[in-house]
């Protein structure tokens, strides 16, 4: 089984390599970051989501478990991306979260992946591309909206 932190870091690198997505982050790739459950600096995913800047994207591992692929057993790694859009008062209809979701799925990294959209790329050499994700509205501890994009990556083989 791979170290899921590698998958998280690789996904962050790919997201930071999509020029249009970085532009949505006010040109700051550091607004796209990983969360790794490091004690004592990262001990609350809820706090990390609540303090996520607007705009910002947080990527976290949410667990791994068994799955099947072609009759064989595999590992399924679950990650989530937490999204906060930037200010969008003039958009009619509003587009900020929809644009972020589209750029995550269809955005093309500038140097990673050979010109393919992120949704078709192998983020880790031992995993298939992400399953098609959904996007879900969520509310943080202070009743502030954000969106979650749960992802699943299937690991083939067993390292």
Image (tube, grey):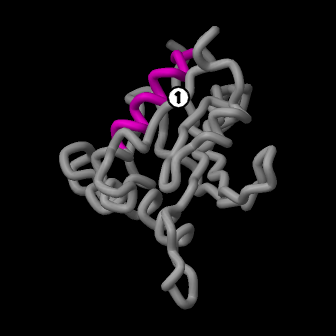
Residue 54: where, in percent of width, then height?
52, 54
Q: Is residue 144 above or below residue 16?
A: below
Q: Is residue 36 above or below residue 87?
A: above
Q: Which residue is mark 1?
A: 156
| Residue 2 within the segment the image draws in magenta | yes
Q: Residue at x 58, y 45 (%)?
A: 81
Where on the picture, by quarter, is residue 50?
top right
**What is the secondary structure assignment of the residue under circle 1?**
loop
Where on the picture, by quarter, is residue 71?
top right
Whether residue 65 can be seen here: yes
Which quadrant would the N terminus be assigned to in this image? top right
Residue 76: where, in percent of width, then height?
65, 32
Q: Which residues are magenta?
A: 1-14
Q: Is residue 61 left or right of residue 91?
A: right
Residue 140: where, in percent of width, then height?
76, 48
For disc 1, the neighbor class at 10 Å (few under 14, some 14 to 19, many from 20) is some
């Amino acid at each position: 089984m791979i170290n899921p932190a590698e998958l998280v870091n690789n996904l962050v690198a790919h997201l930071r390599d999509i020029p249009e997505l970085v532009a949505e982050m006010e040109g700051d790739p550091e607004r796209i970051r990983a969360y790794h459950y490091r004690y004592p600096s990262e001990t609350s995913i809820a706090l990390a989501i609540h303090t996520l800047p607007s705009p910002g994207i947080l990527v976290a591992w949410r667990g791994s478990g068994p799955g099947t692929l072609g009759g064989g057993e595999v590992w399924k790694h679950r990650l989530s991306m937490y999204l906060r859009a930037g200010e969008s008062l003039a958009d009619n209809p509003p587009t900020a979260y929809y644009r972020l979701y589209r750029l995550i799925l269809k955005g093309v990294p500038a140097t990673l992946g050979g010109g393919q959209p992120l949704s078709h790329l192998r983020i880790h050499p031992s995993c298939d591309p992400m399953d098609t994700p959904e996007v879900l509205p969520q509310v943080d501890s202070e009743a502030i909206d954000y969106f979650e994009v749960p992802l699943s990556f299937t690991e083939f083989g067993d390292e």
